[in-house]
Image (spheres, helix red, strand yellow):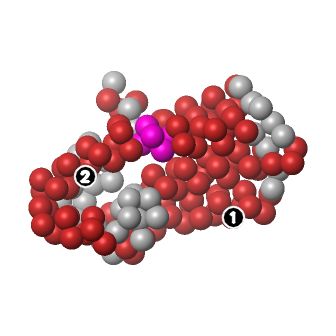
Amino acid sequence: MKWIDLPPVWLLACLVASWLFPVTLMMLRVPWLAAGLLIVAVGLTLAAVMEFARARTTVIPRETPTALISSGVFRFSRNPIYLADLLFLAGLSFWFGNVTGLVLVPALAFILQHRFILKEEERLQGEFGEEFESYRARTRRWM
């Protein structure tokens, strides 16, 4: 059952909830903003996954990493894939004018931080010690 407690599943749950319980406002339909957020989300995800592949370490949240990635998009955010999840949810919410999805953005951020990020940072601290501390001091969690 651990496979179901993964960030993309939580993102999907938020998308489904916003679809099942929509509160829509036509004035939120901002297609250029939404398209931009979606493009940034896809770009962040692809760039981050490529950095994981280059470092030959895992992208799976509960697995122990074999490398500390601080290059590419990880210079700007310690969690670019999670940031991409939030941008994706916000982008689709703007696209469809769905206030429910926008309300779920901070909820998803809370879930990601408390179910994944804090535990990942503990593992990174344990594996990389001072190197991770230095990285954490110079790179923000979200952006």
Q: 55 or 29: which is nearer to us?
A: 29
Q: Position of residue 22 (x, y in %)?
A: 75, 30
Query: Mark 2 highlights which residue?
Result: 121
Depth check, mark 2 against mark 1: the one in front is 2
Overall secondary structure of the magenta section: helix
Going by the numbered disc 2, the residue's amino acid type is Glu
Q: Assess whether residue 92 is covered by the magenta stretch.
A: no
Q: What is the crowding at mark 2: few (fewer than 14 residues within 10 Å), some, or many (at least 20)?
A: some
Q: Residue at x 54, y 66 (%)?
A: 43
Q: Is residue 49 visible in this depiction of the protein?
A: no
CB of mark 2 within 8 Å of CB of mark 1? no
Q: Residue at x 76, y 50 (%)?
A: 95
Q: Secondary structure at mark 1?
A: helix
Q: Farthest residue to the right: give it.
A: 26
Q: 21 or 130: which is nearer to us?
A: 130
Going by the numbered disc 1, the residue's amino acid type is Gly
Q: Work out how far the residue at label 2 is from the one at label 1, CA to CA, in angstroms.
A: 30 Å
Numbered tag placed on residue 36 in the rendering: 1
Q: Secondary structure at mark 2?
A: helix
Q: Quadrant of residue 51?
A: bottom left
Q: Position of residue 31 (x, y in %)?
A: 80, 57
* Image position of 104 (left or right of 49): right
Q: Is residue 77 visible in this depiction of the protein?
A: yes
Say if 25 sits above or below 80 in the image.
above
Q: Quadrant of residue 134?
A: bottom left
Q: Residue at x 27, y 64 (%)?
A: 136
Bounds of the magenta span? 108-112
Q: Earlier in the sequence, mark 2 or mark 1?
A: 1
Q: Residue at x 33, y 24 (%)?
A: 1
Say if 19 sits above or below 32 in the image.
above
